[in-house]
Image: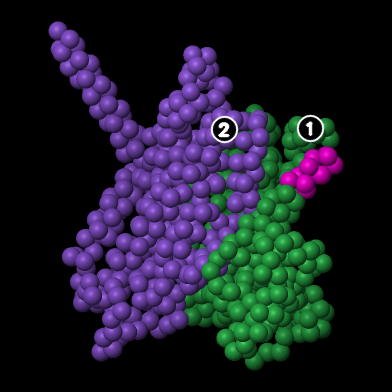
Chain colours: A purple, B green
C-alpha cells in the first residue's frame, strides 16, 4: 500500500516535470530565431569537441608551416583559404572554437559562484554593514569597463590563456553579485522567508535553500547571455595580443594576424571574424529564448 | 539637488579610491621587478637597487601606496618605462585625439540612433523595424574590432571612398598643437583644407565606433516610442490632424530621450573600451592606443594611470548623466532630494 502510494507520487512528479519541460520547450520554440540559434550552437559545440577528427587538417592547429600552400584563396580544398604560412584557416577556426567555448565555460564557472554567494549574503543582510562592504567592493570592480580592467590585469600578469581567463573571471563576478543582490533583497521580505525565520531556521539554510533556488532562473538566463559576451571579451583580448598567443588558433588572434594582410588576402581575417560573430549571435539567440521560458524581464 | 550631487561626488571619490588601491595592489604583487622594468636590461644591479629605493619598493605595501598617492595628488603619475617620459605628459598629448573620436561617435550614434528608433517605433513591424532589429542583433554580437576591420576593408580598401588609417596622411604636416583637436587646430592655423582632410580621416573610425551604439540606442528609443504611441495624447494629436513628422519628432521623441540618456552613461563605458579596438585598427594616435602599447610592454605606471583616467571619466560621465536626467525629468528631481 505504502509502496504503491510512493510509486504514484513519483509518477505524478515525473509527469509534472515532463509537462513543465514540454511547456518550456513550447515557449522556447515559439521564437524560431532561438531554435535556429540552438541548432547552430549545437553544431559549433559538436564541431569543437570533435575537432581533431572532423577537420580536414588537424595538424594545422599548431605551429606548422607549408609555404607551398601559403596565402591560397578559398577553394574546395581549403574552404576558408590558407594563412601566410600555409595553414588551413577552416581547421584553425574549428579549433579556435574550442578555446572560445573553454574561455566562456571556465570564466563563468569561476566567476558566477563567488558572485552569486556574495550577492546572496549582501541581499539577505540588506541594510547592515555586511551589505555595505560587499556592495562597495562590487562598485569598485564596476568602476571601469570590464574590458579595460581585464586588459590591465592580463597585461600586468603574463598574457596567456590561463591569465586571460582569470582576469575575465575577476571582472565578471560583480555583475552576478549585483543581480543576485537585487533578487535576494526583494525576496527576503516574502512570507516564506519570514516563516522560515520565525521557525528558527538557520541563516545558511534560508539563504541557500529558500532564497537561492528562487534566484536561479535569472542567473541561468544571464549565464547564457553572458557566454556570448565573455567569448567576445576573450576574442578581443586575443585580438589585442593579451590573450591566446600564436601559434595557438585563438579566433581573435587569427583576426589580428590576418588583418595585417588586408585587402589582398581578405579571407585570413574575414572568416575568423565571421566565426566570432556567429557563435556570439547563437548564444544571444538562445539566451533570448531562455528569457522567454523563464519569463525573466530584466537580466 | 546640491546635496544629491555632493553625495554622488563623495561616492565616486570613494569608488575611485578603491579602484586605485585595487589596481596598485595588482601592479605591486605581480611577479617581476618594476625597477628593473623601468631601467631596462642594461642597468647595473646598483642602479636597479637605487631605483628600488627611489620608487619605495623596499617599503611595505601601505607605505608604497602612500607615496604613490601623494605623488598622484601632485599630478605626478610616475615615468613611463616605454616612452621614458612622465605619464602625465603622455596623457595630455594623447587624450585629445581620443576625445575627438568619442565625441564624434557619440554625436553620430545619438542622432542616427534616435531617428532610426523613432521610425522603427512609429512604423512598428514594418520592413524597416525588422531591419533595425536585425542590425541591433548583429550589433550586439559583433566585436567592434570586427566592425572596424570590415568598414576599413570595404570603404577604404575596396571601394576607396574613405582615406586609410591615421589622423592625417603621412605626407602631410600636422598643424601646430594648440588644443590637440586636429580639426580645430587646422582651422586655427588657417588651413581649412587640412581640417577637411582630418575630418575625412575621422569619419570611418567614428562610424565604426558608433555602429553598435546606434543599434542599441535605436532599440531603446523604439521601445519607448511604442509605449507612448498608445497614449491618449498622441491619439488626440492625430485626430487634430497634426503632421506625422511633427508627432514623431516632437511629441514622441521628447519623452523617449530620458531612457536614452540613462543608458548613455553605461554606454559610455562600452564606447571607451571599444575605442581601444577602433584605435588599434585605424592606427589612431590616441589615448587608447597609448594604453594598449603600455599594456603590451608591461609599462606599469602607464597602465595604472590609464585605468584611473578611465575610472575618473566614467564616474564624471555618470554624474553628468544623473544631473541631465534630473533636469529632464521632474519626477526624478522631486524623488531625489527636493528640487
Quadrant for residue B208, please give it.
Answer: bottom right
Where does residue A205 sit, x and y in percent of width and height? Answer: 45, 26
The residue lying at 59 percent from left, 89 percent from top is: B42
Task: Decide whether residue B6 is among the magenta residues.
Answer: yes
Find the distance from the CA under tag 2 to the CA under tag 1.
27 Å
Q: Is residue B146 above or below residue B198?
A: above
Q: Quadrant of residue A63?
A: bottom left
Give the side of residue B168 with respect to residue A97, left or right.
Answer: right
Report the residue marked by disc 1. B334
Q: List x then y, in percent, for residue B100.
A: 70, 69
Overall secondary structure of the magenta stretch? helix
Label 1: how many Cα within 10 Å (few below 14, some 14–19, many 20+): few
Q: Is residue B74 above or below residue B85?
A: above
Q: Looking at the picture, does residue A6 appear above or below residue B318?
A: above
Residue A74 image offset from top left, x and y in percent: 28, 77
Q: Secondary structure at mark 2?
A: helix
Residue drawn at (70%, 54%) of the image: B16
Please name whichever residue, B92 or B307, is drawn nearer the observer in this view of the structure: B307
Question: How many discs mark residues in the rendered view?
Answer: 2
Q: Chain of mark 1?
A: B
Of residues B91 and A202, the one drawn nearer to the viewer in this rendering = A202
Residue at coordinates 42% horizontally, 30% vertically from top-left?
A213
Q: In the rendered image, which quarter contains the N terminus of chain B? A: top right
Residue B309 image offset from top left, x and y in percent: 70, 63
Q: Is residue A161 visible?
A: yes
The residue tagged 2 is A123
Residue B87 visible in image = no
Which contiguous range is marked in magenta?
B1-11
Amino acid at each position: 500500500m505504502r509502496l504503491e502510494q510512493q510509486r504514484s507520487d513519483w509518477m505524478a512528479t515525473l509527469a509534472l516535470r515532463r509537462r513543465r519541460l514540454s511547456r518550456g520547450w513550447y515557449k522556447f520554440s515559439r521564437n524560431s530565431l532561438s531554435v535556429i540559434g540552438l541548432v547552430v550552437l549545437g553544431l559549433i559545440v559538436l564541431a569543437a569537441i570533435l575537432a581533431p577528427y572532423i577537420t580536414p587538417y588537424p595538424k594545422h592547429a599548431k605551429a606548422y608551416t607549408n609555404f607551398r600552400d601559403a596565402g591560397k584563396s578559398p577553394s574546395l580544398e581549403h574552404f576558408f583559404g590558407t594563412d601566410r604560412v600555409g595553414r588551413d584557416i577552416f581547421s584553425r577556426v574549428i579549433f579556435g572554437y574550442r578555446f572560445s567555448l573553454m574561455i566562456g565555460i571556465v570564466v563563468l564557472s569561476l566567476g558566477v559562484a563567488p558572485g552569486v554567494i556574495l550577492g546572496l549574503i549582501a541581499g539577505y543582510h540588506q541594510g547592515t554593514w555586511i551589505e555595505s562592504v560587499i556592495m562597495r567592493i562590487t562598485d569598485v570592480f564596476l568602476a571601469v569597463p570590464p574590458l579595460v580592467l581585464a586588459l590591465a590585469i592580463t597585461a600586468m600578469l603574463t598574457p596567456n590563456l590561463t591569465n586571460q581567463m582569470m582576469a575575465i573571471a575577476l571582472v565578471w563576478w560583480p555583475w552576478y553579485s549585483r543581480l543576485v543582490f537585487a533578487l535576494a533583497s526583494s525576496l527576503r521580505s516574502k512570507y516564506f522567508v519570514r516563516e522560515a525565520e520565525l521557525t528558527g531556521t538557520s541563516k545558511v539554510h534560508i539563504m541557500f535553500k529558500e532564497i537561492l533556488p528562487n534566484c536561479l532562473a535569472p542567473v541561468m538566463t544571464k549565464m547564457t547571455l553572458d557566454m556570448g559576451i565573455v567569448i567576445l571579451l576573450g576574442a578581443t583580448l586575443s585580438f589585442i595580443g593579451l590573450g591566446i598567443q600564436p601559434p595557438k588558433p585563438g579566433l581573435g588572434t587569427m583576426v589580428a594576424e590576418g588583418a595585417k594582410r588586408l585587402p589582398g588576402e581578405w579571407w585570413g581575417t574575414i572568416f575568423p571574424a565571421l566565426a566570432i560573430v556567429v557563435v556570439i549571435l547563437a548564444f544571444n539567440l538562445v539566451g533570448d529564448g531562455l528569457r522567454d521560458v523563464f519569463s525573466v524581464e530584466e537580466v | 539637488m546640491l546635496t544629491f550631487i555632493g553625495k554622488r561626488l563623495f561616492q565616486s571619490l570613494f569608488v575611485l579610491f578603491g579602484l586605485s588601491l585595487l589596481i596598485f595592489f595588482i601592479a605591486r604583487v605581480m611577479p617581476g621587478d618594476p625597477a628593473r622594468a623601468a631601467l631596462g636590461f642594461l642597468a647595473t644591479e646598483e642602479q636597479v637597487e637605487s631605483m628600488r629605493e627611489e620608487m619605495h619598493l623596499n617599503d611595505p605595501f601601505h607605505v608604497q601606496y602612500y607615496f604613490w598617492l601623494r605623488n598622484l595628488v601632485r599630478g605626478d603619475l610616475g615615468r613611463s618605462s616605454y616612452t621614458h617620459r612622465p605619464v602625465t605628459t603622455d596623457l595630455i598629448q594623447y587624450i585629445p585625439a581620443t576625445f575627438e573620436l568619442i565625441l564624434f561617435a557619440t554625436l553620430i550614434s545619438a542622432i542616427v540612433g534616435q531617428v532610426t528608433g523613432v521610425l522603427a517605433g512609429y512604423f512598428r513591424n514594418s520592413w524597416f523595424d525588422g531591419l533595425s532589429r536585425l542590425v541591433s542583433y548583429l550589433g550586439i554580437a559583433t566585436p567592434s574590432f570586427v566592425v572596424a576591420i570590415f568598414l576599413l576593408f570595404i570603404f577604404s580598401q575596396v571601394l576607396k571612398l574613405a582615406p586609410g588609417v591615421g589622423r592625417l596622411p603621412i605626407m602631410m604636416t600636422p598643424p601646430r598643437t594648440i588644443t590637440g583637436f586636429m580639426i580645430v587646430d587646422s582651422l586655427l592655423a588657417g588651413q581649412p583644407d587640412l581640417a577637411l582632410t582630418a575630418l575625412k580621416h575621422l569619419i570611418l573610425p567614428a562610424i565604426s565606433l558608433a555602429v553598435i551604439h546606434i543599434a542599441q540606442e535605436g532599440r531603446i528609443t523604439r521601445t519607448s516610442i511604442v509605449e507612448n504611441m498608445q497614449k491618449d495624447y498622441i491619439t488626440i494629436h492625430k485626430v487634430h490632424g497634426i503632421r506625422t513628422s511633427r508627432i514623431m519628432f516632437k511629441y514622441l521623441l521628447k519623452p523617449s530621450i530620458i531612457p536614452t540618456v540613462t543608458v548613455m552613461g553605461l554606454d559610455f563605458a562600452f564606447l571607451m573600451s571599444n575605442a581601444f579596438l577602433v584605435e588599434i585598427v585605424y592606427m589612431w594616435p590616441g589615448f587608447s592606443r597609448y594604453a594598449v602599447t603600455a599594456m603590451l610592454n608591461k609599462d606599469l605606471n602607464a597602465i595604472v594611470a590609464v585605468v584611473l583616467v578611465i575610472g575618473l571619466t566614467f564616474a564624471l560621465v555618470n554624474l553628468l548623466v544623473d544631473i541631465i536626467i534630473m533636469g529632464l525629468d521632474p519626477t526624478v528631481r522631486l524623488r531625489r532630494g527636493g528640487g
